Structures are given as C-alpha cells and as structure tokens.
Amino acid sequence: MRDSAAGSRAVLFPGQGSQARGMGAGLFDRFPETTAMANDVLGYDLPRLCLEDPDRRLNDTRYTQPALYVVNALSYRDSLERGEPEGDYLLGHSLGEYNALHAAGAFDFETGLKLVIKRGELMARISDGAMLAVVGMSESELRAFLDEEGLTRLDVANINTPTQIVLSGARDEIERARGVLDERRTRVAPLKVSAAFHSRFMAPARDEFGAFLKGFRFSPLRATVIANLTARPYGERDVAATLSEQISGSVRWLESIRYLLERMSAEDCRQVGEGKVLTRMVEQIRTATKTLTAPTATTTPARVAAPRRPRLFCVAYAGGDERAYAGLAEHLPDVDVVTLERPGRGRRSSEPLLRDPAAIVDDLLRQLRDRLDAPYALYGHSLGARLAFLLCHRLREQGLPAPAHLFVSGESGPAIPSRERHTWELPTDAFWTRLKQLGGIPAELWEHEDLMAYYERIMRADFAALGAYEHADAPPLDVPVTAMTGEDEWFTPADVDAWQRETTRPLTTHRFPGDHFFIRAQWPALARAVRSGLAPA
C-alpha cells in the first residue's frame, strides 16, 4: 500500500447530496460495457435515471447511492484515461468512500455496486429522523449548544469544516434546534433526506450491513484510503468493520483533510464526479488552518506562547478515587496528571454510583472534553484499563482529538472476558475474601465496619460495571498502546498480547515485580513509560 508523502496526490469522491439531474453525461456512452453491467445489476436504466430522472427518484437514497457510485467510478476512470495521475491517497465523503476503496483495489466495480445497493436499501428502511446543516459554529460550540438545550437525541453526523457541521437525529429535536438557532441568527439548512443518517438511528442498518459484509472478501489496498470513521488510513483487515460502523458514525471530514494537508498541499487534492464541493471544503480547511497557525503582525519570537504541558488523564481502578494516582503524579512533575473521578466517591460522594460502562464513559468524556487543548494520554489500571479503552473509542466516535498514547495495566486485552466479571454477585463474606486476595485495600479499613459498609457499595458498583462490560467488534484504534502487568498476576502472555488486536500500532508490553497492585511500588518506572509515550514521534 502506497503511503509516500513526497509528491503525493489525493483524489476525493463526493457522496450523497452531490447528485443532480444530468450527472454522468458523456460517461455512459464512453464506457458502454461498464454501464451495461450496472444496468444488469440494478435492474433498471441507470443513464435514464441520472440524465432525465423522469420518476423523480434521484433523491431517493435507494437510487442515489448506486447512481453516485457508478458516476464517481466512471469519472475516475475517465480522468485516468485523460492522463490524470492515480491517487496515492483516496478519500470519499460518506458514500464516496466506496469509490475510494474501489479505486484502491479493495473490490471490483460490480462488488462495490452490490455493496452500495444493499447499503441504500438498509438506510432507506429507517424512515424516521432528519438532518440539519449548521454554519458558523465550531464543533465544540455546537456540542455545548446541544447540552445547553437538552437535545439529547441529536448526534453530530458530519464535521465538514471548522464551521460547517451537520446534525442528525430525532425529527422533533432537529426542528427545535433549527428554531433556536434561527432565533440566534445562526445559519442553518435542513437537508433533503428521509432519515437521520450517520447517527445512532442507523444502528439497525449498521448491524444488518455488518452481517451482509461477512459474505465478502476484500483485497489488499494498493493506495492509502482515509476512513471517514477514524480520519486515519484503513488497516488491511479493517474494511468490513469500518464500512458497517460508518453508517452510524460521524463523517470526520475536517480531521481527514487536515491529515492530508500535513502530507501535501491543497493543490494536490482533486475531486472527481459531480461538482466541486469537496475541493472547496479543502480550501476552507486550508485557509482556516493557515489562519490559526500564522503569526500576527505583532508577534515576536519572545512573545510566542510556550507549548502547553502534556496531560495524563487517569481512570481509577475499582474503588479508586481522585487520589488513586497521586504517587504517579509525584514522579511526573512536567506532566499534568488528572484523575477522572467517578460519581459516588471522593468529592463526588453525594452523586449516585454508576454501574453501566457506557454511562461511566459518558461521565468521563464530560470531564475531559474541554481539556484537550494540549498533547495528552490516557491511563487506566484494572477496571480503569477497560474504561480508558472505551473512552478512546468514544473520543473517536465524537471526532475529538485522539490521545497520543493509551497506557493500561493490570488487565487482559478487552476482548477477553474479565475473570472478575461475576465478583459483584458474591455474598458479603465471599466478596471481601476476594478483595483481600486482589489486594489494594488499606489495612485500617478492616477495623471499621462502617467504613467497610460504605466502601462495599462503591466496590460492588465498580465490579458490576466490570460484569456489564461487553466487547464491541469495532475497528482498532490508531493509538499506541502500552500494556503493563505484575509478574505475580494471573495474566498469561497471550492475555496481555490480546491488546494488540485493539490498535493498528505495535503493542508495547512490560512486566514488573509484584501482584495486581504492583503499580504502587513501580511509580518511577511507570512515569518513565508515560514520559516516553508522550514524547513527540
């Protein structure tokens, strides 16, 4: 797979919304055999649909998606025959991602057409919901607006440019958001769609499409394809999982284009197919990025702000509070160590305990969402390792900056069920016996029954979260992972190596003397690992 930045070119393929009557003019006659194949697979006259649209079906997603796929494919083929270079990087907006994968050799033309036909059919079945384009607000401002207005059934579907975001979700909340934004004189535009694409409403379509994709095999990519879902290159084994998740996930176009512009100029990006909307977005993103990074007329070297200190967001183990990683902070004076405290303990003791991993991750995300303006990493021990892993995936789903590193300790790869998943069900005596075996409980606790009763509530809630953990089949993270264990723990090398399947980067592992809570004797060594992981690549 090519991934060379020097002299690279990128080809962009548009998605739904770029369709227009008359599209494909000249291409169908130029490539009659491919057009005939498409007609046979579809069972109707595609050129007539695209050029005349007599039955007004071109905006029906069941027809839109295959039509755009064919026109994009023929446009790219036509550009190559006219002497345009192949794309070293290929990127499609939503439906256009199928053309990017076809151009990279993941599947042939006919297979791709069958995939988009099925995709369009499944998405069309979900008729509820609506979408709204919002212009003039950043993603963080828009998310704050959703929180402020209690619009809990809306998702960010497309992050197109720094100030062009698309919301997707329940129709009544889309209408309410539209009304409030209109009152605030924020530009909005309802999209002509029949459902809430790229939102949680598409989960049934995502799941059925994932099952459908199991009947296909995909070839190695011969060029770099940037995935909408991750804004990073596809891995060789990621095609099926990423395409199914893409249906309900955000289109992270802004971050994808920024990834390209770190490797080439905007002039090296060309759009094929209908219109020039994607190249205009590239220019808007380039201009915005240039504006953010350009020095002002009054800036002098002495007045340039110093780089922000890196941050390490820590997720506590079962029963842990904000003091759980105080020893690590002592050995990282050059890093802001921030422990994300869960409800029901420490300073949040008056809040109800959480037992659902998804709810815990939502809470963790709220704590760090507005603190991602500096390089950062995540670290979790035991239960905290699984929660930190889920948090990485949630950050990716939300299109937020990814951590520079994920550090985990005292836990097997998350695909392996935790051996402690039933601990929360034990009766009190057996529960405390198990906690003694695990270690980490202060000796003085055993002398105070009232403290034990208070602590048991917290521990049971945390172990219940561990028992409720279900590993989802999702594309691996593009985040380096370091997994650490104690020599006297029960994990096998295979248990620890299972973390490798969760990342596209090479896994780093360390074993230290000690039991499950080896970390308390190894803070200096853990600090060195963290410092190394936060170092610029």
Image (tube, grey):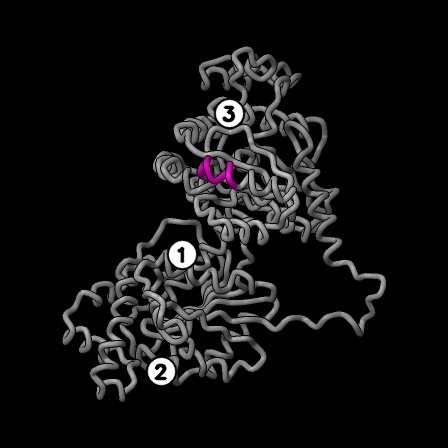
Residue position marked by numbered label 1 in the rendering: 501
User: Which range of residues does the magenta coloring cover?
Assistant: 170-176
Q: Is residue 299 above or below residue 191?
A: below
Where 107 sits versus 311, above or below?
A: above
Residue type marked 1? Arg
- Left or right: 267 as drawn, with respect to 440: right
Snapshot quadrant of residue 190? top right
Residue 80 versus residue 65: which sits nearer the camera? 65
Name the one closer to the observer, 419 or 166. 166
The x and y percentages for residue 370 are: 55, 62
Q: Which residue is mark 3?
A: 66
Residue at 40 percent of width and 56 percent of height: 501
Quadrant for the C terminus in the image: bottom right
Q: Residue at x 48, y 36 (%)?
A: 197
In the displayed structure, 515 sits above or below 264; it is below
Q: Which residue is mark 2?
A: 513
Front in this rendered view, residue 61 or 67: 61
Q: Are marks 2 and 3 in contact (CB under 8 Å)?
A: no
Question: Of label 2 and label 1, which has the lower sequence position?
Answer: 1
**289 versus 44 height, above or below:** below
Real-space Cα separation, disc 1 to disc 3, in angstroms: 33 Å
Q: Residue furthest front?
A: 183
Q: Residue at x 51, y 18 (%)?
A: 57
